[in-house]
Amino acid sequence: MRASDLKVLELLDFRADEGVIAFHDQRMLLYDADVIGILRRELVETVGPKAARGLLTRFGYADGYRDAQTLKKLFHWESPEEWHKAGLVLHALEGKALAVKTRLSGLADDGPFEAEIRWENCYETEQHLRHLGPATEPVCWKLAGYVSGYFSACLGDEIYFVETDCCATGHGCCRAVGKRRADWGAELEPHLEYFKAASVQDEIARLEQALRAQRQAASRQKREAERWKSLAQRLQGPHAPVVRSRAMRDVFELAERVAPADTTVLLTGESGTGKELVARLLHERSRRAKGPFVAVNCGALPEPLLESELFGHVRGAFTGAVADKKGLFEEASHGTLLLDEIAEAPPAIQVKLLRALQEREIRRVGATTSVAVDVRVLAATNRNLEQAVARREFRRDLYYRLNVVNVVLPPLRERREDIVPLARLFLERYAAAQGKEIRAMSAEALDLLTGYAWPGNVRELENVLERAVVLATRDRITVADLPPALRGGGGLLAPGESAGALPLRALERRAILAALEQHHGNRTRTAKDLGISLHTLWRKLKAYERDAGTRRR
């Protein structure tokens, strides 16, 4: 028997009276190719392209392996090579694909097996294009699995075929290369996982976990929005505003004036100064307040993911794009979009952002038409954009488009009168969150807070207070509850003091507070160590407390 002698009507036994089609002792089934295409789409959309590829590859492998065994039992082949080639002929007879060019070597001995097969009219590419659209990687998963299983059965060894060209990716035909596992080397490693019998339940569990994480993130985002809104109200509340410094009051006054307009605002300032808080304030005071507030960190994602995140994509735009997806420009429709860390946006993204701002329309990745968007754009950065423009790291035209109104947030060290009220606000919040009855901070702790340089600004202050509340064992925050960086004097600068010589009174105060910290708040030991009476120590500490109270007022 030769492979070319195979005829489909001779291979199959149609027993209509029994409702059975048999191939030797194997029952066969006939299905509409579109049904298989729908199954492929359902698998991709349900368990993801990676798991779907694995399932169909292993399905094809089992199909090929069984066919090889059946054909060996069914006929006396003229030579082993004819049996090896029969699988490709059978594939064509089954209507799956036509092998138009085949190169097989190393079939007769244990030498290196090398194969190259080219197919036309592959049903997998036809169905993938029809139900999932163009692909960026080969999609003949079942076909590659089939020839891998067939030749593994023929040669009694692990044979793997890897598809290199595919009609679904724009090639003229589908092409696969096959070798023994030992001859592939490291090149095979990325493909081996699709031949392993991974548990679908594990994949479903992974997807469920990802869904739960997404829901939790959405819930956290909602709580965070409420927290920012509450904080903004507290910071500039008419009765007892937390912000006391002239510099920050100027910031909030400018924000109030700019908010009703629909203009673009650029928020600049060091990390942790409150740029997102002001951005949310601009949103809450604008005519878009009932719309969504959406923020994205432009430096947190690589360029392809950032482009898809901002502008969305259409189905089939890339591997894994199983459905159309809106970008954040569309998600923020009738609301506000904050482009945080805008200076980190890649050059290609800067071009697309400029077009979106100028034309008020975006184009999804892989799309051929544009979508109009109604969104107010805010941008924030802790870098000097003018210097970035001069270094050609940031587009000048985009800078001008973003910098219609520039709101500059001063660092905390330049508005020290805000430190104590902010610290009290954070103390109140985290004490309530931890369920602790902590109502105050000691004078020594306040003195350290107001004397610290705060390189991390308000965010660092908030973290310090959260830590202090967690560690506190009394009804007030003491020096012992503060981080070592504060207690050790690192970064300390009193108001108006330089890093050089300090007034005698300031030196004395630091020495006393350092000794008190060293003895964990024990005043008797502190007085003895300093060589002063307990009464003197008590009197000086009360004086420091009064000084702190005066500064707070």
Image (tube, rainbow, N blue to C red):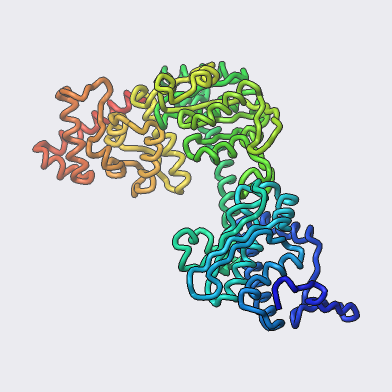
Is 386 displayed left or right of 398 in the figure? left
Q: Quadrant of residue 497?
A: top left
User: Is residue 171 visible to the viewer in this orientation of the structure?
Assistant: yes
Instruction: Give residue 17's position: percent from left, percent from top.
Output: 91, 80
Q: Quadrant of residue 383?
A: top left
Q: Residue at x 61, y 29 (%)?
A: 336
Residue 54 or 431: which is nearer the viewer? 54
Residue beneath the point at 27% across and 44% down? 480
Seen at 35% across and 47% down, the residue is 472
Question: Where, quadrant-wise, is the C terminus in this rendering?
Answer: top left
Along the line of sight, the residue nearer the viewer: 378 or 310? 310
Q: Is residue 422 visible?
A: no
Give the vertical position of 544 relative to 260 (above or below). below
In the image as oriented, which residue stretches furthest toward the left?
A: 531
**Residue furthest to the right:** 17
Q: In this view, does 87 lie above or below 469?
A: below
Q: Toward which corner of the image does residue 492 lie, by quadrant?
A: top left
Out of 134 and 337, give the one closest to the viewer: 134
Identity of the residue drawn at 62% across and 65% down: 145
Residue 538: x and y, percent?
Answer: 20, 35
Q: Where is residue 166 in the image (x, y as percent from the top left)?
A: 64, 52
> In the figure, is residue 281 to the left or right of 416?
right
Quarter of the image containing the N terminus? Answer: bottom right
- Tag count: 0
Percent x, y for residue 318?
A: 61, 45
